[in-house]
Image: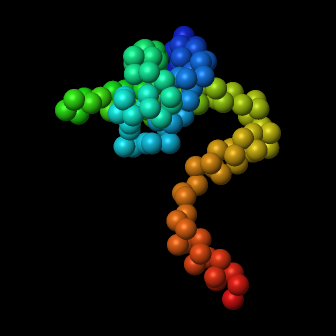
Amino acid sequence: MDETRAIDALGALAQPTRLDTFRLLVKREPEGVAAGELARLVGVPQNTMSAHLSVLARAGLVVGERHSRSIIYRVDLSVFRELTTFLVQDCCDGRPDVCAPLIGSIKACCAPATTSAARKKSHARQKL
């Protein structure tokens, strides 16, 4: 990712409703969310959400796909990955010990969620 694209993407995210929308869409991958549902979930009028989605789409962060009468929006994970890599590519000047906490926090947030049944089973095993 070049600097201009990174600035465009960061600029698109530099607004509370767009950032909330983007984060919601990341959570809803890979299913995506219909535009009207996004507006309801974020608490803005549909025409306002449409304008925000246009900004995010122009920055390459989200894509919309028509399904019948709805447009389902998803995060473009490849662009998200490029932006994240751009931000940390020179992290710590090649000193992995300095970057370790950052890498650890990314791994922790991306760990597979355990189901309540699996947690109960694990907890029961720990009691034995």
Locate the C terminus by quadrant. Answer: bottom right
| Figure disc tally | 0
Q: Residue at x 58, y 55 (%)?
A: 111
The front one of 10 and 88 is 10
The front one of 116 and 37 is: 37
Confirm whether residue 10 shows in the render: no
Residue at the (22%, 29%) spot, across then down:
69
> Percent position (x, y) of residue 31?
37, 43
Q: Quadrant of residue 113?
A: bottom right
Taking the spot 80% from the left edge, 39% from the top edge, the residue there is: 98
Residue at the far top in the pictured view: 4
User: Which of the 4 quarters of the picture holds residue 48?
Assistant: top left
Residue 103: image x %, image y %? 68, 44
* Residue at image coords 63%, 82%: 124
Most extreme residue toward the right, as rendered?
Answer: 98
57 vs 98, left or right, is left
**Residue 36 point in image, percent of width and height:** 36, 29
Compared across the picture, whether 81 is left or right of 71 comes to: right
Asked which quadrant contains residue 71, the reply is top left
Quick check: 95 above or below 71? Answer: below
Vertical position of residue 105 compared to residue 9: above or below: below
Query: Taking the image as drawn, is residue 34 in sight?
Result: yes
Q: Residue furthest bottom?
A: 128
Colouring scheme, one of rainbow, by chain, secondary structure, one colour? rainbow
- Between 26 and 103, the one lying in front of the other is 26
Depth order, front residue of 102/22:
22
Is residue 94 left or right of 82 when viewed as pictured?
Answer: right
Q: Is residue 108 above or below residue 87?
A: below
